[in-house]
Amino acid sequence: MRQFVSMEEAFEAIEKYASQHPIKTSTVPLPDAVGQVLAEPAVAQLSIPPFNNSARDGVVLSSTGIDAAKRGDTITLAGELRAGDSIETANGLSGMAARIMTGAPVPDWGAAVVMIEDIEFSDDTSFIVKAIPDRDAWIRPKGSDITSGLVILKPGCRIVSEHVQALASSGVVEVTIHVRPRVGVCSTGEELVDISSGRPGSGQIYDSNRPFMNAVMQSFGCDVAVNEHVGDTLDEMVNFLKNAMEASIDLLISSGAVSMGSYDFVKPALEAIGARIVFHKVKQKPGRPLLFAILPNGTLYFGLPGNPVSTVVNCRFYVHYALSVMQQQKQEVSIKLPLEAGIDKPEGIAVFLKARCVRAHHGASVCALEGQESFQTRPLLEMNGWVVMGEREGSARSGDMVNFYPLNPNGLPDIF
């Protein structure tokens, strides 16, 4: 077991072990895949468009038709093409022009489409062209959007509703995804009262960590299969860990009982069941007592400090990173933003600062909020992200560029 590792060392260790425990996969119909992470490449089965088609209502002209239009000749329609007509029907028309509707196949002799407003009809089938089109005007070429056989979505991408549009159009009717990770959450401490159990008594506080962990894990796309509170005894924690392993979960997190107090029993409980403790304590603030272990059955375990902001930080960055690695997702990249005001920070420790990104006429900037202690939750109502500074960084001045991460790892902050 390593102690007092750096933030970078913690991420490296998590990546090493999380990559050895990928989330199971399943092939599902496309509509059922929204919100899931793609496990195998999605390959286009059809080109988009699947054939040359018209981008406007109007008349399709052949090369000969364009020449006639340039001379000001009256041109006669050979027929009409509608969306849904076959390519064979389009190619079966003979002549130099045909009326065509948006989305209809362009015949193999089609050289350009003239918009209906640029045509003057003398009767139902005869017309002159008022504005000569460029060659290939208003023709959507086959495969100009997506080419059949192309990998259009790579593993590790979380499928959103907009993806369905392109996937369905290109014939991807089913995809292989990582199933929703099964996770467990647990809070510890005799002082905690469930939020549904009435007002806390003397010396008690509401259990806020467990409902937060349950909510954030669901926002990460997980199914919370275990959700419990454990009292301040070693036996209770040992029994909880054993029961959690029987629940066939991929990842387990607990809050509290990972420091050095008389009732901090997580580490002894892990040792008692034969877990491998990878590291304990990270050189960071908040959340220094973070513990990462591998349970005997291979389940990844995170022991989070009990202070509420420590739990939030460690879930947002370390637990989310583990889940990302287990689902082949790319490492998150920060947004570089200038500071509105300076930050005092000693070297030798990483910091996660509650922050707010704001936008003005000169662009976006970020400020660290008041109330950075790990017990202070009010700033969580005002912030839209985190400023993260590594242990080698010192104090920063107004205007310096810093690393900003939005609250939601899957999207930009609301200011954008």
Image (spheres, rainbow, N blue to C red):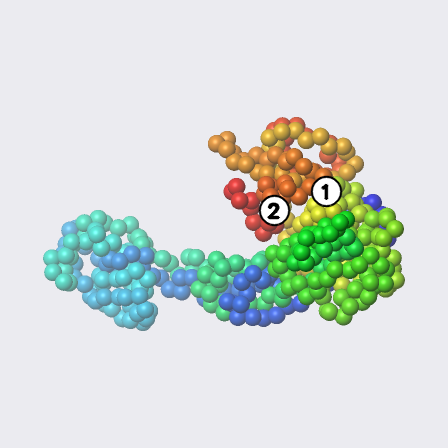
Q: Residues within 10 Å of mark 2 (few under 14, many from 20)?
A: many
Residue 55 position by quadrant = bottom left
- Total numbered circles: 2
Horizontal side of residue 39 vs 47, given as left or right? right
Tag 1 residue: 374
**Residue at the spot 42% in from the left edge and 57% down from the top edge:** 144
**Residue at the spot 21% in from the left edge and 67% down from the top edge:** 79
Q: Which mark is residue 11?
A: none
Q: Is residue 235 above or below residue 400?
A: below
Q: Nearer the viewer, residue 54 or 28?
A: 28
Q: Amino acid at mark 1?
A: Ser
Horizontal side of residue 85 vs 116, given as left or right? right
Mark 2: secondary structure: loop
**Residue at the spot 23% in from the left edge and 62% down from the top edge:** 99
What is the x, y in percent for residue 315? Answer: 69, 51
**Residue at the spot 72% in from the left edge and 43% down from the top edge:** 375
What is the x, y in percent for residue 103? Answer: 33, 62
What is the x, y in percent for residue 344? Answer: 71, 30
Q: Which mark is residue 407?
A: 2
Horizontal side of residue 250 vs 149, given as left or right? right
